[in-house]
Image: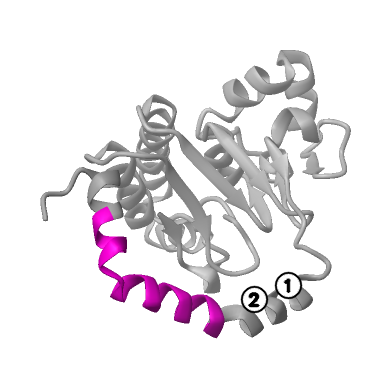
């Protein structure tokens, strides 16, 4: 599944939260890969939704309702019987950090960071952030990180506790791609020759127990 609101830095509005909840509670097999489009993983809750609610006089109700739905989502991610893997190639801010921490694995590039910024706005953490962070680094450290509105990068001393793995793009990927392109025709021609050989079908029939 993919967060695909790059123009809003993949901020979570009620629709996005509902779609994610359906994705992690629906039927399926194999791991769930949570990725994001654009330079940010997730900016947390969509402030535009809160602004509109404030202008209409319904901020308290929207904050409460959204918090319940988001808590339900985070619990569903943790309880999901399938492994949930977050791929972070940018900042996960506020609720975005909660979403990342709820996943079983967090694979990050050097551009990733977890931003626990609620205290900057005088707001309490949401999405079970306090519990998830305490589970990862201990309650005392978690309280300090939240109070300081800390940003944890992949170079932080806490990176090994909060990121499962840190992956850098191959520095010579252009050379590798050029080599792959150069050998592409030869490889595909060999496969075509094998496909035309009756022996190949017999071998595959034995391997996959196919009746031919």
Q: Is residue 24 magenta?
A: no
Q: Is residue 196 magenta?
A: yes
Could you tell me if the residues under marks 1 and 2 are in contact, i.e. CB atoms within 8 Å? yes
Residue 44, image x, y percentages: 55, 50
37 and 114: which is toward the camera: 37
Q: Is residue 51 above or below residue 189?
A: above
Q: Could you tell me which secondary element the residue under label 2 belongs to?
A: helix
Residue 34, image x, y percentages: 48, 50
User: Image quadrant of residue 83?
Assistant: top left
Q: Which mark is residue 41?
A: none
Q: Is residue 172 above or below residue 124?
A: below
Q: Residue at 68% x, 54% y: name it.
A: 91
211 and 104: which is toward the camera: 211
Q: Which quadrant: the N terminus?
A: bottom left
Magenta residues?
A: 185-202
For the stretch drawn in magenta, what is the main secondary structure? helix
Q: Which residue is label 2 attached to?
A: 180
Q: Looking at the image, can residue 116 be seen?
A: no
Q: Residue at 32% x, 72% y: name it.
A: 195
Q: Sort mark 2 into few (<14), some (14-19) or many (20+) by Cα contacts within 10 Å.
A: few
User: Image quadrant of residue 101?
Assistant: top right
Taking the image as shown, residue 16 lies to the left or right of residue 142, namely: left
Q: Residue at 79% x, 35% y: name it.
A: 159
Residue 122, image x, y percentages: 67, 39
Q: Could you tell me which secondary element the residue under label 1 belongs to?
A: helix
Q: Sort mark 1 into few (<14), some (14-19) or many (20+) by Cα contacts within 10 Å.
A: few
**For the view shown, which residue lies furthest in the front direction?**
199
Q: Which residue is label 1 attached to?
A: 176
């Amino acid at each position: 599944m993919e967060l695909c609101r790059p123009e809003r830095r993949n901020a979570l509005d009620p629709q996005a939260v509902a779609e994610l909840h359906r994705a992690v509670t629906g039927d399926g097999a194999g791991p769930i890969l949570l990725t994001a489009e654009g330079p940010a993983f997730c900016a947390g809750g969509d402030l535009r939704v809160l602004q509109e609610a404030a202008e209409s006089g319904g901020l308290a109700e929207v904050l409460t309702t959204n918090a319940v739905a988001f808590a339900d989502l985070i619990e569903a991610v943790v309880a999901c019987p399938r492994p949930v893997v977050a791929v972070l190639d940018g900042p996960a801010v506020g609720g975005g950090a909660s979403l990342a921490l709820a996943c079983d694995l967090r694979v990050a590039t050097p551009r990733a960071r977890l931003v626990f910024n609620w205290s900057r706005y005088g707001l309490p953490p949401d999405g079970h952030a306090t519990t998830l962070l305490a589970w990862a680094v201990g309650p005392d450290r978690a309280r300090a990180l939240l109070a300081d509105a800390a940003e944890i990068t992949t170079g932080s001393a806490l990176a090994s506790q909060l990121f499962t793995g840190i992956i850098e793009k191959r520095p010579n990927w252009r050379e590798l791609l050029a080599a792959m392109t150069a050998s592409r025709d030869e490889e595909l021609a060999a496969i075509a020759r094998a496909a035309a050989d009756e022996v190949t079908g017999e071998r595959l029939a034995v391997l996959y127990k196919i009746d031919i």
